[in-house]
Image (cartoon, rainbow, N blue to C red):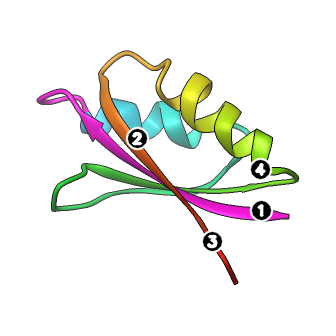
Amino acid sequence: MVHAFIMVKTAAGKSERLLEDIRALEQVAEAHIVAGTYDIIVEVDVPDVYDVLQTASSDVQGLEGVADTKTYIGMD
């Protein structure tokens, strides 16, 4: 199992709606609005590293209002 964190920067005023859409994705374990450089932190648990790529680049980045993402894969 691969555990990863996807940091999401949203367009102005889009965080709350995007949080709902992100939480609805099957691969998402948790998602939270945060203060800082990014607006939402998403935790995913997936079987393979490829699935992290799919979730970040297609599923999350494909949502309207997502401006940027950065992905970190857990090493423990």
Q: What residue type is labelled 3?
A: Gly
First of labels 3, 1 by sequence position: 1
Left or right placement of residue 65 versus residue 4 in this view = left
Q: Mark 2 points at which residue?
A: 19
**Quarter of the image with the C terminus in it:** bottom right
- Badge 4 local density, few (<14 within 10 Å), some, or many (20+)? some
Q: Give the range drawn in magenta.
A: 1-14
Of the 4 image quadrants, the one containing the N terminus is: bottom right
Q: Residues at badges 1 and 4 in contact (C-beta under 8 Å)?
A: yes
Disc 1 target residue: 2
> Which residue matches tag 3?
74
Marks 2 and 4 sit apart, C-alpha to C-alpha, by: 23 Å
| Viewer-closest of 61 and 25 | 61
The amino acid type found where label 4 is placed reads: Val
Circle nearer the N terminus (2, 4)? 2
What residue sits right under mark 4 in the picture? 49
Three-letter amino acid code of the residue under disc 2: Leu
Q: Tell which of 68 and 43 is nearer to you.
A: 68
Question: Considering only order in the chain, which callout, 3 or 2, is on the residue closer to the N terminus?
Answer: 2
